[in-house]
Image (cartoon, rainbow, N blue to C red):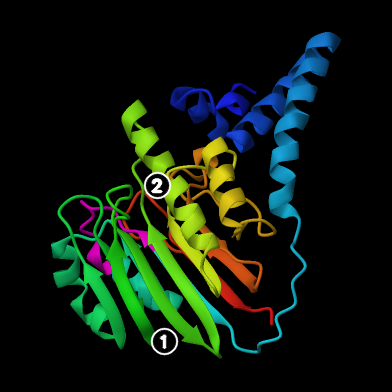
Amino acid sequence: SLGCFGKLDWRIELFSHFRMQYAILLGLCTLLFLLVGELIRSIFSAGFMLINLSMLIPFFHQRNCIAKSQIVYRLFFANILGPNTSYKKIQKAIENARADLVLLVEVRPNHVIALQDTINGYAHKLVQPSEDNFGVALLSRLPIEAVDIQDFNGTCTPTLIAQLALESHALTLIGMHPYPPKSKDQARQRNRQFATIAPFAAAQSGEVLLAGDLNATAWSYNFRELVHNSGLLDSQKGFGLQPSWPANLSPLGIPIDHVLHTPGLCVMKRQLGSLTGSDHRPIILDFSFVN
């Protein structure tokens, strides 16, 4: 419950991310206390377990949306991890996904060289690697009307903004990777980026997809503010919890990689992709247009 007060301090917010683990642990404590006859303690444990379960239930409640378009598009998003040299794993994950749009973050120059064949398999692209953790790449089978990397006057890490026209629909794709909240300053920078991007997304005239390693879970106060102020929906809701980090520790994993979208898009399917050698699992999202 301490995580509910994450608005107050970045360190307190860290406790908000482990709702699934809390629910499981409290469920076990409830059973244990019942077995040893500790009724009061079992009631307290059950109460806190129910609080955490109430925060998990929305992710298993399917959103009712009916896509009028018969065309389904696929987005592949992945934080491929700057030091990662498992190039074949990255290549295989991308190629197996058969996505129309591929968005990658933490792209370094050596990734571009090693993945050149995969990159060249996409007709449209923007690749801007960096030796730090803020290189980005967009690969697309769909025509891109405009694409750029922006920092919004220094308030954001390099953020990809792409404009596409699909079936006469305008679609803005936003790809971002804010700082991880490892300190008060980095948490403040991440939150400032959320505060900058939310009104930008809300101001777009067409549909919006926002994908990224946001370094926050859906239970974070600042993430909830991003969703609320942008008017976007969390694509994870209705598809169960999909913990994307750390990749090799699913029982301890938390969902910090996200795809948000406007209500005019219908998410047909959302799943985690195969391991890439990164500490993050990719997200694969199938979507269509509601109208």
| Quarter of the figure with the C terminus | bottom right
Residue drawn at the location 33% of the way across and 43% of the way down: 179
Q: Earlier in the sequence, mark 1 or mark 2?
A: 1
Percent x, y of residue 149: 28, 65
Q: Using the image, tell me which numbered label, if any, was put on residue 142.
A: 1
| Residue 187 versus residue 42 in the image, above or below | below
Q: Which mark is in front, 1 or 2? A: 2
| Quarter of the figure with the N terminus | top right
Q: Over which residues does the magenta segment extend?
A: 78-89
In terms of depth relative to the viewer, which is nearer, 33 or 237?
Answer: 237
| Residue 130 versus residue 115 in the image, above or below | above
Q: Could you say which quadrant of the image residue 187 lies in? A: top left
Query: Real-space Cα distance between discs 1 and 2?
Result: 28 Å
Percent x, y of residue 177: 36, 52
Percent x, y of residue 281: 43, 56
Percent x, y of residue 101: 42, 76
Residue drawn at the location 50% of the way across and 53% of the way down: 198
Amino acid marked by disc 2: Gln
Mark 2 residue element: helix
- Is residue 255 shown left or right of residue 192? right
Residue 275 located within the stretch drawn in magenta? no
Residue drawn at the location 43% of the way across and 63% of the way down: 274
Local crowd size for mark 1, using a 10 Å CA cut-off: few (<14), some (14–19), many (≥20): some
Residue drawn at the location 68% of the way across and 78% of the way down: 290
- Please name the residue that numbered disc 2 is placed on: 193
Local crowd size for mark 2, using a 10 Å CA cut-off: few (<14), some (14–19), many (≥20): many
Q: Looking at the image, can residue 73 be seen?
A: yes
